[in-house]
Image (cartoon, coloured by chain):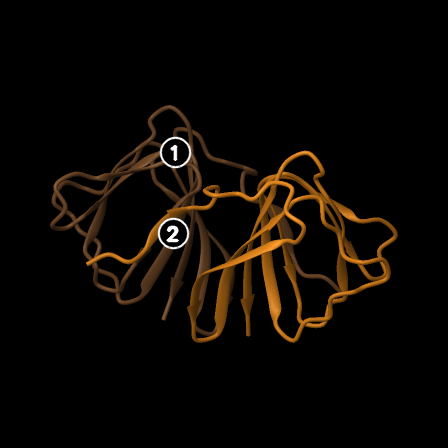
Chain colours: A orange, B brown
Amino acid sequence: MTGPAGNLFDGLPRDAAEEQFIPLLQAAGFVLERIVSTGQASPPDHWYDQERAEWVALLRGSAGLQFEGEPEPRVLRPGDWVAIPAHARHRVAWTDPDQPTVWLALHHD
Amino acid sequence: MTGPAGNLFDGLPRDAAEEQFIPLLQAAGFVLERIVSTGQASPPDHWYDQERAEWVALLRGSAGLQFEGEPEPRVLRPGDWVAIPAHARHRVAWTDPDQPTVWLALHHD
């Protein structure tokens, strides 16, 4: 009578070469996923320009999230969330080099 | 060019009489909200029976989440999430009496 369950901090990769993306839930109009970064950043001068809006929260670790037109990346700490409109160009300037950074991302129409 | 931002742990009530519900994001097909419990529980023999499915994660504090037909509440700790299908009868048996319990709930079609 109940659906799946889990823990957002289980099975965190460490020192992985790539960021890890795990879908948690998919329904009409959205996808919810866990992202784990282990020091990765967007390539220099690479900007995400996404068709869908994204609500993203940082739950563990830290990161610098830069929006085009802002002089400096925003420093994100646990609990910080940002609503990123569709086509708001942004990049991940840095993620914590010393521990996994756990994000919860809701991509939606 | 960017949307709202905040921190999930800002402005937590303490010793509030009622649970606090703050909508974070609403779009076609879902509502995302923060819930803060400060020791509340569902009334005895009260079961939630919701029209929509709910994905819920506990981010801080602790709680007992009971599903009808299960002998004991599930103990939820930070990072634990549960996907609750529509009409899966459940109740909050208890929440942490000593600190705010912060939930992130995604109610969806």
Q: Amino acid at mark 2?
A: Val
Marked residue chain, label 2: B
In this orientation, which residue lies closer to the viewer: A6 or B7? A6
Residue at 80% of width from left, 49% of height from top? A73
Residue at 88% of width from left, 52% of height from top? A71
Residue at 82% of width from left, 62% of height from top? A68
Say which quarter of the image contains residue B38.
top left
Q: How many marks?
A: 2
Q: Say if residue B27 shows up in the picture.
A: no
- From this view, report whether residue A10 is shown above or below residue A65: above
- From this view, report whether residue A37 is shown above or below residue A99: below
Residue B16, numbered label: 1
A68 lies left or right of B85: right
Q: Position of residue B104 (x, y in %)?
A: 44, 49
Q: Position of residue B39 (x, y in %)?
A: 32, 31
In this orientation, which residue lies closer to the viewer: B80 or A10? A10
Residue bearing mark 2: B56
A41 lies left or right of A51: right
Q: Quadrant of the N terminus of chain B?
A: bottom right
Residue A85, numbered label: none
Mark 1, secondary structure of its residue: loop
Q: Look at discs 1 and 2 and give the one toward the viewer.
A: 2
Q: Say if residue A106 shows up in the picture.
A: yes
Residue at 65% of width from left, 42% of height from top? A15
